[in-house]
Image (cartoon, grey):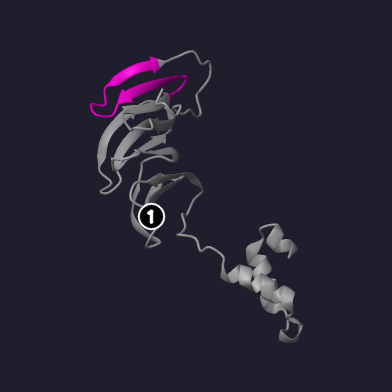
Amino acid sequence: GRMYGNNQLPQAWQLLDLCPENLRNWEWHYLDQLRQGENQPLGKHSEWVTSVEFLPNQRLATADISGEIRIWNLEGRNQERAWRCPRGVMNLAAHPERDLLAVADSQSVTIWESESGAVIYQVPGAALFAEFSNDGSLLAVAIGSFIQVLDTRTWEPVCELTGHESRILHGTFDPSGN
C-alpha cells in the first residue's frame, strides 16, 4: 500500500506478486484491482519528454530533449508517426483547428504539418516557447528577451513585445485572444 501511495508502482506490483496465495486477503485483492485498472502508457521516448500538446481530432504530440517528435492516436492508443528535429525540443504548441505544430528549440521555431511532418515555416532565433492564440490566427514566439507575434495566414510579423531584461521562458494569450 505504501509503495502504491508513493507512486513506486513497479516495486509495488513485484511485492504483490510475491505474496503467498494463502495470505491474499481483501487488501491484496484491492491492490490487484488497482493494478488491473492502471492506465497503460501510450509508448516511450528514449529521452526525457519536454513537451506534450493535444492536437485536433483525438491526437497527441510529444517531444523529447533529443529532438524526437511523436504523434499519437488517442482512440487507437498507437503511434501514428515520428520524426526528428535537428536539436532538442523545448516546447510544442498545437494550432487549435489546423494540423500545425510549432516546435521551439534552442535556435528557432519551426512550424510543422503534424499529419505529414513537412516544414511549413521557420522563425529563426533562440526560441524557448511558442503559443498559438485561442482562435489560431496568431503565433507568439519568445526569442531571447522579446516576443514576436506572427499572423498564421501569412507568417508575417504583426508586432514585437519588448521590455523583459532576460530570456522569456513562457507566455500565453488571454482568453480574449490578446
Residue 132 lies in quadrant: top left
Coordinates of residue 30 in the picture (x, y in percent): 68, 72
- 147 above or below 67? above
Q: Residue at x 47, y 54 (%)?
A: 46
Residue 2 lies in quadrant: bottom right
In front here: 118 or 151? 151
Give the number of callouts.
Answer: 1
Residue 37 visible in the displayed image = yes
In front here: 156 or 54? 54
Coordinates of residue 146 in the picture (x, y in percent): 44, 19
Q: Is residue 157 in the magenta section?
A: yes
Residue where numbered disc 1 is placed: 72
Coordinates of residue 32 in the picture (x, y in percent): 64, 73
Left or right: residue 163 versus residue 25 is left
Left or right: residue 165 versus residue 29 is left
Residue range (magenta): 143-160
Instruction: Look at the magenta stretch and give its main secondary structure.
Output: strand
Q: Quadrant of the N terminus?
A: bottom right
